[in-house]
Image (cartoon, rainbow, N blue to C red):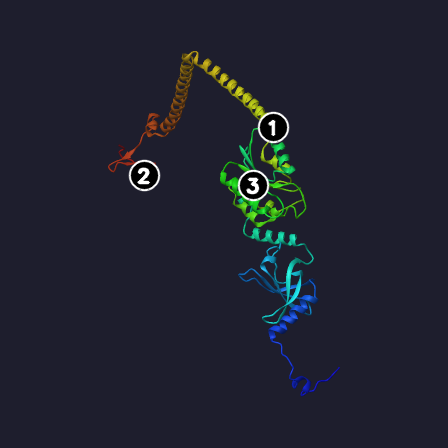
Amino acid sequence: MTTVKAFDTRLFGAPERSFLSVSELNEIVKETLESQLDAVWVAGEISNLRIPPSGHLYFTLKDEKSQIATVMFRRQGAGLRFAPENGMAVLCFGRVGLYPVRGDLQLYVESMEPRGQGALFLAFEQLKKRLAGEGLFAEERKRPLPFLPASIGIVTSDQGAALYDMLRVIGDRFPDRRIVIRPVKVQGEGAAKEIAAGIEDLNSIGAVDVMIVGRGGGSLEDLWAFNEEIVARAIFASTVPVIAAVGHEIDFTIADFVADRRAPTPTAAAEMVVPKKTDLLEHLASVREALRRGMGRKIESARDDWRDMVKRMSDPGRKLREHQQRLDELSVDLVRRFQDRLRQWRDELGRVSGRLEALSPLAVLQRGYSIAHKLPEERIVKDAATLTAGDRPD
């Protein structure tokens, strides 16, 4: 290694020495980095996330020992399936460069995905949680399906087997129903917007009583249009009940949670939307027969009541005579009861009179006794010892 002295004339005295400006130095570093270092995948954790009105994403990507400033411009960020958050572990693909204005080393991210789980799964969970918090999945807002809709709307692809399965099932179950088909893309770029527009169109024409929104089976990526927020809000805003019929029985999408009813398959949705006409006719025949039997019993009961009434009304005077006879019987019984009571009273009076007569002084006199008075006081003589010879009795 060569040691350069502070006053070496080769550096400070040479007339041919040149200078770099800060901007020039930063540009040299920037070009060197970009030419020597290819695009890389970098694993780290998001912190200090900022999203200004421009829509660009600014954050710090860090690990246990180091960190680097990171930017993801709006155009690249628009393609993200999930919402980045502070503390989220991610994998970023991009290039390392220098921001010349401040001389900052930066990672310019082209794409990003969650570390440890798929971006689609994370986006699904994030949107599901947010919409549930807003009440879009609330059971109390879900409407019942009409029992027998006159008109059925279907929002799906007109090229898929799902549509033909639904038309076949509805035709077999109730062939005279009116069906309005709104063809849409069900996967790929722009599919979510078309599905939402189809739902809005069927609502605006006001010609359907219920709506089936769905498609046949596929991968998570194939079904992703039904996980988009724009579709969920279109279903929520629908003025007619919506049946979500997306994929197979094991497939669940955001549309399933928002819809008034979820069908495990498009075929099941067709079975759900209308009953079997033959079943209804059989039930109607059964009800008609039960009604006929019930009316027959009612008529026979009324006929029996009428016969009894006719019998009672055939001789109106009979009832009057029966009542007159009963009145006579009651009159005789009343007189008899009165006479018995009068006789009891007379006997009782005789007994009381006998007891009183036995106690009367007059009765004593009638038996030969007298009451002696001593003159001149006229006192009653109660004891012979009070008398003397010569006293005059009254």
Tell us which disc is closer to us: 3 or 1: 3
| Spatial CA span between label 2 and label 1 | 129 Å
**CB atoms of marks 3 and 1 within 8 Å:** no
The residue tagged 3 is: 242
The residue tagged 2 is: 386
Q: Quadrant of the C terminus?
A: top left
| Spatial CA span between label 3 and label 1 | 24 Å
Q: Quadrant of residue 287?
A: top right
Identify the element where label 1 is drawn: helix
Q: Residue at x 54, y 52 (%)?
A: 134
Identify the element where label 2 is drawn: helix
Inspect the image, locate mark 2, and give the three-letter code of the amino acid beneath it: Thr
Tell us which disc is closer to us: 2 or 1: 1
Q: Residue at x 70, y 63 (%)?
A: 38
Inspect the image, locate mark 1, and give the three-letter code of the amino acid beneath it: Asp
Q: Compared to 60, does 342 lie above or below?
A: above
Residue 279 disc label: 1
Upstream in sequence: badge 3 or badge 2: 3
